[in-house]
Image (cartoon, grey):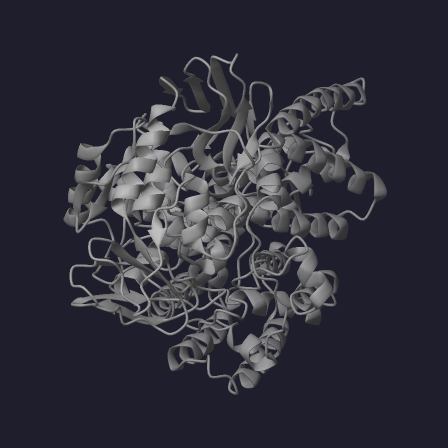
Amino acid sequence: MKIPKPRVPGWAAGRTAARAAGRAPLLAALLTVLAMCAGDAVASTFPFGPHRRSVNDLGNQFLPFHARLWDLLHGRADGGLLLNWQSGWGTSFLPDLGTYLTSPFAPLVALAPRADLAYALYAVTVLKAAAAAAAMAFTLPRMRPAADPRMWWGAGLLGAAYGLCGWALLEAVYNPMWMDGLIAFPLLCLVGVWVREGRRPLLGPLVVALCWTANFYTAYMATLGAALVLVVTAPRWRVVLRGAVTVLLGVGLAAPVLAPVFLGTRYAYPGVVRDFVPADGADLAARLMPATYGFSTPALFVFTAVPVLAASLLFRRMWRWPAVVAGVALSLQWGPTHLVWHVFATPNGSPYRQTFVLTGVLVLAAWAALADGPPDRRSLLGGVAVVGVPALAALGSDQVTPWGLGLFAAGLAVVLVRHRRLALPLLAAALVAQASATTAWGDKERLARLDDYPAWSAADSRRAAALAGADGWPAYRTDSGRPQTTGNEPMMLGGQGGSYYSSLTPDVLTRTMAALGVGWTSRGRNLQSLDNPVTDALFAVGARLRDGEAVRTGPALPLVTVRPPGPAPVYGASPFRNQELLLGARVYEPPAADGACRVGTEVFFWSPDVTGTARLGDRTVRLRGQLLKWRASLVSLGIQKVPGLRAEVPPKGELACLDHARLRAAVSALRATAPTAVDVTDTGFRATLRPGTAGTVVLSAPRIPGWRCDGRTADSYGGLVAVPVTPDRREVTCAFRPPGLRLGLATAVASLLALTGWVLLARRLRRPSGEPDDSNSRVAQVTSGRVTVPPAVSS
């Protein structure tokens, strides 16, 4: 790693530095793409082999949301940016958009055919990792310029090490929106450089706004990390204040997306409250190595040279960066700081989602060790010794793998190579080998431990075509039915169904559908389609998919109906009775004394907390219930055809017999009083009423916050959107606007005005001569045979 002194004249130093600055991001990006794709190829994982890549929420949630984005961008979606008519009988879409789809990379999926969305999302994920690596490689020499412009390779390797950190390869690859946080950290550190130097008052807030819009959750963590870096590198109150103003202005500009997301979280069905439990010390040490995996431990791996270089600072009496690294590392394990990192709520999944910030700080520390020239042998040996101690502790963890130990040891050895022409290719090869092995190991372990979902197939194309052929929206809904491939089947296949899975699933939707007998997973945030004639009638389902074919269901109500005057239904414990309350008619009857239903009726069974089977004759139905994680759906056991035939069901539950003749009569009665015309738009509907209509107009959509009818907040009728009407009314107009949108727009306008004033003030405070001060000089100086670039060098 020894580098000879440069032999360039002073006038050429600036040009050499500029060329070097462009090489580092390119090297970082290329190594990142190479390592990620090589690891997936070794594991024979999609798109390089038969093993599935879509595990957990990647296949169940994120890919379907990108499918909806594809439909929106191609003009094929039911609904728009504010209202999603496809899922959950009609849900707010802007909070989902802001949570999953506002990355500037997300629209790139629209360039691919819809059937190839999985390929497109993979390409976008790799591109994000490469962008993060390039952003770090670009930022490092601007935070601390290298003494020798030929040190660009160091910035390139460290940038790639950041983009290929364990958190990115093991956690973020199947949560692609988190990759935007990986990009945000170096960008926000770059903003910190501008703040420190008092430059770019306009661009700084715009970069902050971009990062927070792309993914506010990880951007929040990245902002905390970048703020810490700024305080450490420029501990002056004016600089810190300038940084705070920059962040506030940027967040304010992103408010039209952020405010609806925050309020959407407030109105979402509550998740499970967890207590944070720190990880075991041996497991922590093990996760520093490549080729390890643990869902509840932090993915601490980063190319072995990085922690060695950071630790070498201790032997050069440079304490600042090692102290920062230690502080961030300890904050991962302490309950109060854990909550601060996670917006004061322990996540339901992995509790170490802020790990990428620790990786970023480690990379900054490693660059501090390289910027003035590679460490001497004594410092490197000290760094190797420091990093080797956790390796010994890791031997007590079952997360250590032989491959991980071997690659870790090889990384330690490569760092000690001194000859530059030999060191560079060895370092690059070791980096790619460690990252590829980590990628391959993560592919294998995730597939073994997590749920997985198949890629789009010819069968899916046939199902989508069947749904499209039966589509009658808005005259009636078409439901993608059961069984479901993903929790967001309507977004993937089409139609306007009841299934829906999001972190923002509305509380009113979950509670209403639970009262009507729906099944769920993910503790109430993943609602399943309910194949039941009564709920099909209530929610205007005229066709649904069964066995891959679209079939017409029984009699269905129109999307908007009128219920007679009287109080709204109040739900009880029985889903059968609740359905009747919402319908306004008795359509179920209890089984006879011998436990059998009357011939000609349809037998239904409900037992939400039971896992097992229910049977009527030769028809067997599986139940899956384990409250609160899973809830078994109300199920049909078929038509009673044999007198006295009893259903074989678990002892805990409720049996009911549906009279289809009564259901048809109830539907006919409500259709007779329904509006004469209904005009459905991307944000609401307008209904023309029959003369003399009195009662309550009901839209078969959940009454989520944001619905307004005729200028006032909509009422609720059994959890559905409603508005009372008198005989003099001829028309009802209802529109949906996500809560927080108006506040967000107002905040953005105010922030824009404040930013304008901020920029004008910054320009006015500049020196009258317009000359930059000494700290902003961009002139490279050649002293004592070494090129030194002032700290304020920028692009």
Q: Residue at x 69, y 68 (%)?
A: 330
> Can residue 569 be seen?
yes
How many numbered badges does the structure rendering display? 0
- In this view, the residue farthest toward the right is 237
* Residue in the foreground of this view, choosing between 399 and 568: 568
* Residue in the foreground of this view, choosing between 10 and 425: 425
Q: In this view, does 6 lie above or below 673?
A: below
Asked if residue 503 lies left or right of residue 476, the reply is: right
Residue 754, image quadrant: top right
User: Which quadrant of the rendered structure holds the C terminus?
Assistant: top right
Q: In this view, does 263 lie above or below 737?
A: below
Image coordinates of residue 342 in percent, x first then y, are 63, 56
Asked if residue 396 lies left or right of residue 191, the reply is: left
Q: Residue at x 59, y 19 (%)?
A: 711
Image coordinates of residue 66 in percent, x first then y, are 37, 41
Image coordinates of residue 676 in percent, x first then y, are 36, 17
> Can residue 26 be seen?
no
Q: Residue at x 21, y 67 (%)?
A: 644
Image coordinates of residue 213 in percent, x first then y, are 55, 37
